[in-house]
Image (spheres, rainbow, N blue to C red):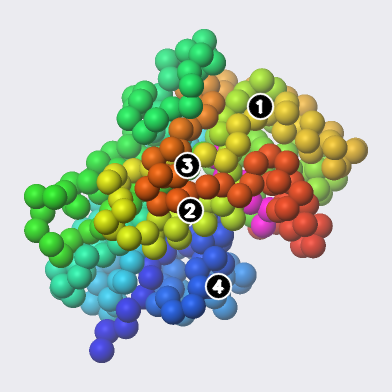
Amino acid sequence: MTESVILVSGANGEIGHGLIQALATLSGTPPILALDLNELSSTLQPLVKYSVQGDILDARLLARLNEQYRFDSVFHLAAILSSQAERIPEAAHRINVEGTLNLLQLASEQAQRYGRNVPFLFPSSIAVYGIPDLQTKRSLPPLQEDQHNLPGTMYGCNKLYGELLGRFYSHPAVPEPKLDFRVIRFPGIISAQTEPVGGSTDYLPQMLHAAHAGKPYTAFVRADTQLPFITMPDATRALIRLWQAEKSLLQKQVYNINGWNCSAAEFAAKVREHYANAQIDFQADPLRQRIVDSWPTSLDDRVAREEWGWRAEHDLDAAFAAYFLPSLRGASQPTST
Ligand code: AKB
């Protein structure tokens, strides 16, 4: 019989690391099939049953996976992040939109083939918001899901359209079995295990990891830049909780979550409390500053709280005390993803 697996695309990325480690602690879940362009990291290899190196744009590869496996659920994490997407917009569109379409189609075919709705988890982003200027950004309350959905970046457009594509494949008018499409809009995520590459929220995790490594760090944004952030354990808890939520509890498909909000200077001060010799300065990169200035200071996550009991465990203080410091001080060097 065809084996049932959880497909994780973009498994080598930061969320992939956090999610696979978290899924591996659950009992009674199907084994993981990790899909990534690169060879799966040695940290993750013991945690997955199957590891496939390949491209989500490769139709032949996806057809083979469709024949060989039965997808219990799909976590589609593969993406080109915002700063990199701005530099190579057409390539980003191919991965972020065509790649997403391919996986949505694959999961829909699986739903038909095996006669069962297939949960499809899609990490979206604060990038789907587009705030016209800094003055407006500073005046706004935490944004709800349907406010300011006019992104100005390729990545933001890709993520917003990915949400719409998922809606299309899971629309009430589409007969079952079909996709059970669920989305979390993530703030910037900070992992103590891995370092991000290519995102516009990278300045806080990079600042933390540089301080821990005893290296100087120049942030690529102004010191007063404010965004929402969350820890990786909270991010993966949210994904798993939404995945496991009873369908009858969910009125929506797209949910904001929020951890804490702070400026780059506030985070730097916190880093210095724990790493007294940390050398941090700020030199705004115009492209990346423009991107983060168009993103909200804070997200309103009331709907996620009410419908599926979401609640971040870490605010800024708890993030340092209960996660960053214990993890960093108990570990070796972070992995770049
Ligand atoms: C990025 O900076 O591109 C990502 C995101 C906000 O989705 N971290």
Nearest to N terminus: mark 3 or mark 1: 3
Nearest to N terminus: mark 2 or mark 4: 4
Task: Select label 1 or label 2 by which is in front.
Answer: 2
**Front one among 296 and 288:** 296
Q: Would you say the residues marked 2 and 3 are in contact, meaning their CB atoms lie under 8 Å apart?
A: yes
Helix, strand, or loop for circle 2? helix
At 36% from the left and 40% from the top, the residue drawn is 159
Q: Name the residue under label 1.
A: 263
Nearest to N terminus: mark 2 or mark 3: 2
Q: Name the residue under label 2.
A: 238
Label at residue 257 = 3
Type of residue at label 3?
A: Ile
Rendering coords of residue 64 (x, y %): 26, 74
Q: Is residue 197 something that shows in the picture?
A: no
Task: Determine whether, in the image, residue 169 is placed left or right of residue 279.
Answer: left
Rendering coords of residue 30 (x, y %): 40, 77
* Alpha carbons under labels 2 and 4: distance apart: 15 Å
Helix, strand, or loop for circle 1? strand
Q: Name the residue under label 4.
A: 25
Helix, strand, or loop for circle 3? loop
Type of residue at label 2?
A: Ala
Q: Quadrant of residue 71?
A: bottom left
Report whether the residue tagged 4 is closer than 8 Å to ligand 1: no
* Residue 48 within the segment the image draws in magenta: no
Q: Around disc 3, counting alpha carbons within 10 Å, would you say few (fewer than 14), some (14 to 19), or many (20 or more)?
A: many
Q: Around disc 2, counting alpha carbons within 10 Å, would you say few (fewer than 14), some (14 to 19), or many (20 or more)?
A: many
Q: Around disc 4, counting alpha carbons within 10 Å, would you say few (fewer than 14), some (14 to 19), or many (20 or more)?
A: few
| Residue range corresponding to the magenta coloring | 188-193
Type of residue at label 4?
A: Thr
Rendering coords of residue 133 (x, y %): 47, 13
* Alpha carbons under labels 2 and 3: distance apart: 8 Å
Q: Would you say the residues marked 3 and 1 are in contact, meaning their CB atoms lie under 8 Å apart?
A: no
